[in-house]
Amino acid sequence: MAESVPVRCPVCRRDHQFTATAYPCPCGEPVAPPLDPGGAPEEVTDRAWSADWVTVPCRACARADDWPRPELGCPCGAVLRIPLRVLGQGAPPVAVPSVRPAHIPLPATAPTPRPAFRPMAIRTARDAVTATALYLRWLGFRDIRRAAWPVPSGVGLAAEGLFAVVEPTVRVTSVRDVECLWLTALSESVTCVYVTLAGYGDGARERADSLGVPLFVVDLAGVPQPANGAGEELVVGGA
């Protein structure tokens, strides 16, 4: 079983169950950051890239590598940093034999369930765009490419019937960003999706809800998570 801990959002008090993402050590053993079930999550309001990585030793070969620090995107728009257990003092490294990235599962009655999404770690802005393109393809969109339509901030991606914006920086997405995305998608008669690393500012999620724009927050493990109801519906139904 993968290590999993309960997480309560300090902003909206919503309860979540968070499962750590495992990464492959060069020796072949899956490695995951050890989670602290008694710790309190912190809302990420300012990004410091040096704090977004954690050194985790491999249980099999003792090799220590840096991996993205676990984060959770709450549907309220907050990005939460998951507390970690300090290894040492008799506490052995935690090894996870297998793990599924956190996402909303398809209904049991779905005729052709998708395989688990395979994330890629985000270390650069380009990685964030690539991870989003992989996720959109996993959702069922095809021929993902750079969009020809201009965007106020971030990177535009297009596919058949889709216009998506990826904000790969620490800039918080605003109401205007959401509205510009929606207006462009409306003019082209396509579905729109917004994906960000840093979360959504005051009013942005509410505006997206009123317009039906699916919102996602992607963590440094490369796992986008829905940040509103429209995003959850897209995950369940696919493209």
Image (spheres, rainbow, N blue to C red):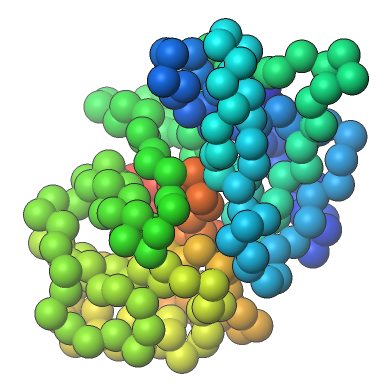
Q: Quadrant of residue 6?
A: top right
The residue at the far top in this view is: 60
In front here: 161 or 8?
Answer: 8
In front here: 226 or 62?
Answer: 62
- Residue 132 seen from this side: no
Drawn side of residue 95 relative to residue 9, left or right: left
Q: Residue at x 63, y 67 (%)?
A: 47
Is 204 above or below relative to 227? below
Drawn side of residue 20 relative to residue 109, left or right: right
Q: Residue at x 59, y 27 (%)?
A: 64
In front here: 145 or 60?
Answer: 60
Q: Residue at x 55, y 39 (%)?
A: 67
- Residue 176 seen from this side: yes
The number of numbered badges drawn on the structure is 0
Is 132 above or below relative to 198? above
In front here: 204 or 217?
Answer: 217
- Quadrant position of the N terminus in the picture: top right
Is 208 above or below relative to 112? below
- Percent across and percent down for residue 144 are 16, 57
Drawn side of residue 35 relative to residue 177, left or right: right
Q: Quadrant of residue 130?
A: bottom left
- Percent across and percent down for residue 174 are 52, 84
Q: Quadrant of residue 153?
A: bottom left
- Percent across and percent down for residue 61 are 56, 11
- Percent across and percent down for residue 117 are 36, 35
Q: Residue at x 69, y 36 (%)?
A: 17
